[in-house]
Amino acid sequence: MAQEHRPPIESGCPDGFQYMHPVMRKNYGAWDYHEHPRPGVLLHVAKNGDQIWTVRAGTQRILDVFTLRTLCDIGDKYADGYVRFTIRSNIEYMVADEAKVQPMIDALEAEGFVVGGTKNSVAMISHTQGWLHCDIPGTDASGVVKAMMDELIDEFKENNMPNRVHMTTSCCQINCGGQGDIAINVQHTKPPKINHDLVSNVCERPSVVARCPVAAIRPAQVNGKPSLEVDEKKCICCGACFPPCPPMQINDAEHTKLAIWVGGNHSNARGKPTFQKLVAAGIPNNPPRWPEATAIVKRILRAYKDDARDWERINDWVERVGWPRFFELTGLPFTKFHIDNWRGARRSLNSSTHIRF
Ligand code: SF4
Ligand code: SF4
């Protein structure tokens, strides 16, 4: 008799259809048009006339159980118990009955949630969880988000921007986060400090050497023990050696800063992807409110709001006016640090066949 095999354990992402509002499931692929009746609310109309309203509210990325219960109670009362979370950590309720839309908004606002983040608003800043789950953050990305969104709350609630603004933060210099219309990223400014007593116990030296993008790390013997050394002239202070080797400490209260990058966007039906460019560096990593970084973000948003044409994203606007004009309009200083003079860039960034060194 053939041996019976154990069925595989499915531990991946579950099928989303089972969680979808019945009106959405029924009309999957059969929508006619959608409208935006007010900030924070979308209306989708199916070909057969079915309608469904989506109400979006901002939430923090990490939700405690009491807040979740409050949000779920509101969903049970007004949205037939269906909710979903967006990739920018907003909660969305699907409401099939128009009469329940305004009472739901009132219930959310009564509990202190903010309805908005749709169409040409400043959407919720996307970010990683930093201290809560990761071993390498150089700042508290969630804290930066809270401090900034407190000041941008009106831009989240209203539709005053020329087009949508996506902002991101990252809490280290190398991994998740950090690609958007405006990105607030960690910037290390000093090479790692090595604790030689710990390296041989904690680090797998060949993997650490291989991690460095500019080959600045070499194996070394220090005080008779195997360790590592860094060629500080080559080091670009990226922090990539810190995750596999925590004794190569790079986070530093004084020398870990923030940098702001502008103009990143995905490709779409009309344009290629655009890469963001550095516009402000060496900004103090200044918890708990990060006032310096927030002031620069607000300055960029004000210039974009005043000068961009309707429906221009930030990258479209900068491309039209040019980077010199961007710096004039925002009043941000353009310094020698904005010019990429890293000699490795000749091979990696300057890829034209006409200009080769
Ligand atoms: S951005 Fe870096 S520090 Fe933050 S969660 Fe991602 S890997 Fe960790
Ligand atoms: S910080 Fe980056 S560039 Fe410097 S030694 Fe570590 S991996 Fe290499």
Image (tube, rainbow, N blue to C red):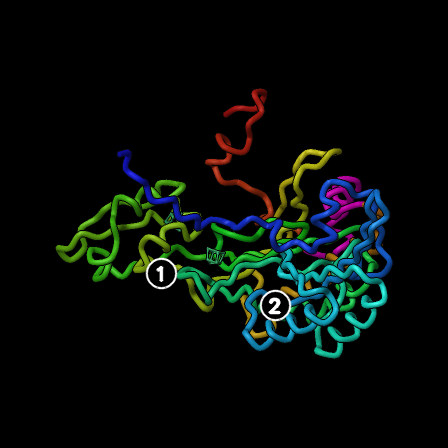
Q: Quadrant of residue 340?
A: top right
In this view of the protein, which residue sits in the foreground, 223 or 140?
Answer: 140
Q: Quadrant of residue 33?
A: top right
- Magenta segment's dominant SS is helix
Q: Quadrant of residue 183?
A: bottom right
Residue at image mark 1: 249
Residue at position x 65%, y 45% from top? 264
Residue 213 to residue 143: above or below: above
Residue at image mark 2: 60
Tell me where residue 17 appears, x and y as whole percent.
62, 49
**How many numbered marks does the figure carry?**
2
Tell me where residue 287 appears, x and y as whole percent.
55, 72
Residue at position x 62%, y 69% from top? 146
In this view of the protein, which residue sits in the foreground, 133 or 40?
Answer: 40
Q: Residue furthest left?
A: 224
Tag 2: Cα neighbours inside 10 Å, few (<14), some, or many (≥20)? some
Tell me where residue 141 appears, x and y as whole percent.
54, 64
Residue at position x 78%, y 68% from top? 154
Tell me where residue 195 appears, x and y as whole percent.
27, 61
Front tag of 2 and 1:
2
Tag 1: Cα neighbours inside 10 Å, few (<14), some, or many (≥20)? some
Residue 6 to residue 190: above or below: above
Find the magenta span and give its range.
312-332
**In screen coordinates, is 209 left or right of 213?**
left
Q: Is residue 315 magenta?
A: yes
Quarter of the picture containing the N terminus is: top left
Amino acid beneath label 2: Gln
In this view of the protein, which residue sits in the foreground, 32 or 176?
Answer: 32
Q: Is residue 341 visible?
A: yes
